[in-house]
């Protein structure tokens, strides 16, 4: 359950009056999600999402996220469009928090990921990267290789309590990634959290119908975003790697934006980095989330297995490229 801030009927009516979106007819909290408070807002004109940005989002970064969604929507990408008030402003305050209204996207995130979902995902990710190329704002990735060691230091003392040997596994991996990270690859705007819960499809259709949750978006290596997706979409619940899903993801991405030889060669190390990034944030949350919190932290062990898998890979061929 992720409704951290309560909003009264009077508050919402006053807030919506600043916009040209009609009158409120219903308003309810959305249970899914972990970072922010989201409400489904229906007016007599359309449906919208009202988001109140909670503590983990840096308010200084919000103009980047909202500006990016404006930019991508204008380029035809199906992502939430920030709604601007009559005064032209999209980022406002409500109940003491930064808040914004965005368009509501139809579609559903897949409950069971099938290979065809990865085909749609690859194309959508490449479209996002292409559409983001001329976005003029810049936001560095606080959760890329430089950010991992401070995060690790903040929770290393508890790592072995989560799994014996974890502290050494992470320390060794950090040393390897810090020395070998491929900084010179093509870069641009990445989503950085394109997990299945952030990708919508219409039932029976292969193409992605919409992308949401741009609140980790930043500037970083484009192929790193592919590595994040490969981890989030191409492993089965028993931790086995599904090479058909990976092949679909990579080949449909490549049809929209060709991957260079250097990007392909770097995929195993990028996938190791993507594994470590989510292992660390999940480890931090696992250790620091109070027992009575509204949200259940995600299990870091899943990402230990993914990291170990990629440590054994020496070329992108293992991800299904070059196969029929
Ligand atoms: N623009 C949107 N259109 C439709 N549903 C949305 C939209 N934005 C958010 N949601 C719904 O709200 C849920 C939580 O949103 P999300 O941005 O993932 O929150 P959080 O950042 O807190 O994890 C999503 O799983 C989805 O059900
Ligand atoms: N995708 C992350 C957690 C962030 O969750 P979201 O609801 O903001 O997408 C993970 O799996 O660790």
Image (tube, rainbow, N blue to C red):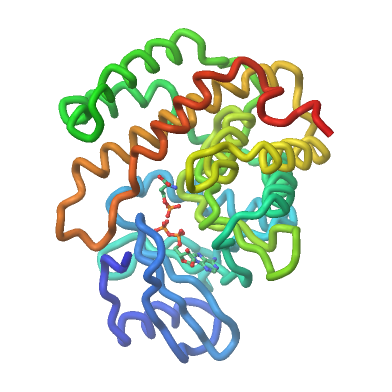
Using the rendered image of the protein, determine whether residue 134 is visible from the camera's viewpoint.
no
Q: Indicate the quadrant containing the C terminus: top left, top right, bottom left or bottom right.
A: top right
Q: Is residue 36 left or right of residue 246?
A: left
- Residue at image point 36% right, 59% down: 36
- The correct choice, above or below, for 198 with respect to 7 in the image is above
Q: Indicate the quadrant containing the N terminus: top left, top right, bottom left or bottom right.
A: bottom left
Q: How many marks?
A: 0
- Residue at image point 20% right, 49% down: 289
Q: Position of residue 237 (x, y in %)?
A: 49, 48
Q: Position of residue 122 (x, y in %)?
A: 71, 44
In the depicted view, which residue is nearer to us: 75 or 320?
A: 320
Using the rendered image of the protein, determine whether residue 220 is visible from the camera's viewpoint.
yes
- The correct choice, above or below, for 274 with respect to 72 in the image is above
- Residue at image point 39% right, 21% down: 146
In the depicted view, which residue is nearer to us: 13 or 292?
A: 292
Give the quarter of the image for residue 74.
Answer: bottom right
Q: Is residue 84 left or right of residue 124?
A: left
- The correct choice, above or below, for 165 with respect to 254 in the image is above
Give the quarter of the image for residue 262.
Answer: top right
Which residue lies most toward the top here? Answer: 179
In the depicted view, which residue is nearer to us: 139 or 300?
A: 300
- The correct choice, above or below, for 120 with respect to 44 in the image is above
Q: Position of residue 206 (x, y in %)?
A: 75, 59
- Residue at image point 43% right, 11% down: 176
Q: Position of residue 84 (x, y in %)?
A: 54, 67
In the depicted view, which residue is nearer to us: 148 or 292?
A: 292
């Amino acid at each position: 359950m992720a409704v951290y801030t309560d909003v009264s009927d009077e508050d919402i009516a006053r807030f919506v009056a600043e916009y040209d979106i009609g009158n409120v007819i219903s308003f309810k909290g959305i249970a899914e999600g972990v970072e922010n408070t989201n409400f489904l807002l229906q007016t007599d004109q359309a449906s919208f999402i009202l988001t109140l940005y909670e503590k983990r989002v840096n308010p200084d970064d919000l103009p980047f996220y909202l500006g990016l969604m404006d930019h991508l929507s204008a380029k035809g990408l199906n992502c939430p469009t920030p709604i601007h008030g009559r005064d032209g402003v999209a980022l406002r305050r409500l109940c003491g928090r930064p808040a914004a209204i965005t368009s509501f996207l139809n579609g559903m995130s897949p409950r069971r990921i099938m290979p065809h979902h990865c085909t749609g995902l690859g194309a959508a990710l490449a479209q996002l990267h292409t559409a983001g190329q001329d976005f003029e704002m810049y936001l560095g990735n606080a959760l890329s290789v430089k950010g991992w060691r401070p995060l690790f230091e903040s929770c290393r003392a508890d790592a072995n309590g989560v799994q014996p040997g974890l502290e050494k596994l992470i320390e060794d991996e950090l040393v390897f990634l810090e020395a070998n990270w491929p900084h010179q690859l093509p870069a641009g705007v990445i989503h950085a959290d394109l997990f299945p819960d952030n990708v919508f499809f219409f039932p029976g259709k292969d193409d992605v119908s919409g992308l949401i949750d741009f609140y980790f978006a930043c500037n970083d290596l484009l192929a790193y975003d592919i590595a994040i997706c490969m981890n989030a979409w191409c492993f089965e619940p028993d931790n086995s790697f599904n090479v058909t899903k990976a092949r679909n993801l990579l080949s449909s991405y490549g049809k929209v934006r060709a991957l260079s030889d250097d990007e392909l060669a770097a995929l195993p190390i990028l996938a190791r980095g993507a594994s470590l990034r989510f292992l660390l944030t999940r480890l931090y949350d696992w250790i620091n989330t109070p027992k009575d919190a509204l949200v259940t932290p995600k299990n870091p062990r899943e990402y230990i297995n993914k990291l170990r898998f990629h440590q054994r890979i020496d070329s992108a061929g293992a991800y299904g490229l070059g196969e029929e």
